[in-house]
Image (cartoon, rainbow, N blue to C red):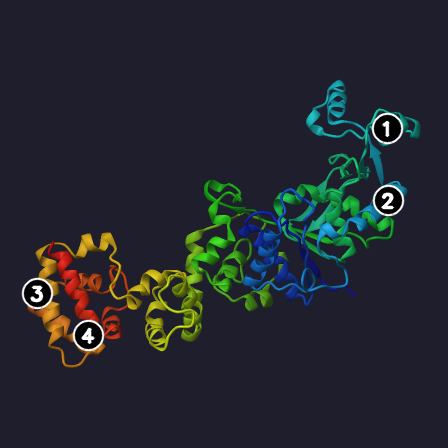
Amino acid sequence: MTAPVRTRFCPSPTGTVHVGVMRAALFNWAYAKHTGGAFVFRIEDTDEARNTEESYRHLLDSLRWLGLEWDEGPEVGGPHGPYRQSERGEIYRDVLAKLVEAGHAYESFSTPEEVAARRVAAGQDPKQGYDGADRETTEAQKAAFRAEGRQPVLRLRMPDTDLSWDDLVRGEVTFAAGAVPDFVLARAGGQPLYPLVNPVDDALMGITDVLRGEDLLSSTPRQLALYSALTDVGLAQGAPRFGHLPLVMGEGNKKLSKRDPTSNLDLYRERGFLPEGLVNYLALLGWAIAEDRDVFSPAEMVEAFDVRRVSPNAARFDLKKAEAINATHLRALPVAEFVTRVTPYLADAGLVEATPTPEQQRVLDTIAPLAQERMVVLSEAVGLLGFLFRDQPEYDEAAVAKQLTGPDAVEVLDAATAALTALPDWTTEAIEAALRQALVEELGRKPRQAFGPVRVAISGRTVSPPLYESMELLGREASLARLAAAREVAAR
């Protein structure tokens, strides 16, 4: 029987959360869920200078916002804890001792300068790195080095054979014998390094599949060698399967940098992307549910996810496409759900109460189906719907310059005011009929010229929810007051 799939996500809690990192989390989560396996979340927080508790909490919150709940890890627990590297120091020290005792790791006293000098003396490029000179250092030589005050690092003895694996994304990959030098497992003084702790944690936590970025592919031979050593000392059961995900590229066909604002997950959350919309787009960065289909739910992704169908080709982050995907999800929301999700953005802007008043709720429920069709992200509701919750609209300067200047605008607003003042029934249908009669039939204006000044008078913008429905919601008194205020602006 094949062991159940166990994937992992192991970020460092530093700075902002990168969308490319979340893409890796998503693929690991979907693979585990698709196969009925487990998704393990652990924190690589041994870099005390850069890691912060705030970033740690933010990571947890970001995963939960995206819906990527973990089966084992912080605040969930599990049989392989602790799940923070900073709490696993004793484990790493014990592993190092076993590797040294078995001859897989050895003390290395050479300085970088000495290694480079030896390479040059041998007519080699010093960039080739460590040359293995300390492999056979005698106990007497070690004692002499210590007498000089030197402290050794610990290196893994790399095998003298090719290292190959069947990559889940890229197929067969081989590194020739000698291509990867013996690497450092622990600093002088014994502090374990990432090349040790990451595979050790994977081995002890029973991780079967590692999906990670293509930029880490060159470190895989080191991990395979370490897994072989860990297996030999009884701490692992062979190496996991590896799959190296395509890079996420930004502008200029360069890797999407953490310094690039579009890489920051918070940007999308604050703008009002739906988590399911962003998950959908992140999934498209290297995978597709079908050739002719771009929009799907997280549940549909889990159902269809096949890691062997992940593309090895770099994926470019396209903000416009991300927005289009999100807009499709937003428009598919049930109206009541849309209102629930948009309300916090309106409340944060001071337009409605955190729990809307009955009147605010009535306006929201009425306008929601009309606004939903015009929005890409939830934060757009502030500009699009704000006029419905203010005494007067906030005029957009460009809209005023375009629609509320000169005698033509005054004439349109006067005619609209006269027609609406005499209107017996204040309904959407009656408002539309009255304005069309007064502005199109009697003034002879084209619809764009006729209704543009009225729209800006009512909403302050050239783009708004449907005009007549908005005026019915505002009521006769408020609508006429806005027409009068706009006339004063147009007459200046």
In this picture, residue 17 sits left or right of residue 472: right
> Which residue is tagged 3?
444
Q: Are marks 4 and 3 in contact (CB under 8 Å)?
A: no
Crowd around label 1: few <14 · some 14–19 · many ≥20 (10 Å):
few
The type of residue carrying mark 1 is Arg
Q: Is residue 286 above or below residue 114?
A: below
Foreground tag (2 vs 3): 2
Q: Are marks 1 and 2 in contact (CB under 8 Å)?
A: no
Q: CA distance from mark 4 to mark 2?
A: 83 Å
Q: Residue furthest right?
A: 140
Foreground tag (1 vs 2): 1
Q: CA distance from mark 4 to mark 3?
A: 25 Å
Q: Nearer the viewer, residue 100 or 385?
A: 385
Q: Earlier in the sequence, mark 1 or mark 3?
A: 1
Circle number at residue 13: none
Q: CA distance from mark 2 to mark 3?
A: 91 Å
> Which residue is tagged 4?
476
Q: Residue at x 69, y 42 (%)?
A: 219
Q: Nearer the viewer, residue 353 or 58?
A: 353
Circle number at residue 97: 2
Circle number at residue 146: 1
Q: Are marks 1 and 4 in contact (CB under 8 Å)?
A: no
Tell me the quarter of the picture where residue 221 sits: top right
Q: Earlier in the sequence, mark 2 or mark 3?
A: 2
Q: Earlier in the sequence, mark 1 or mark 4?
A: 1
In this picture, residue 138 sits left or right of residue 450: right
Foreground tag (4 vs 3): 4
Foreground tag (1 vs 3): 1
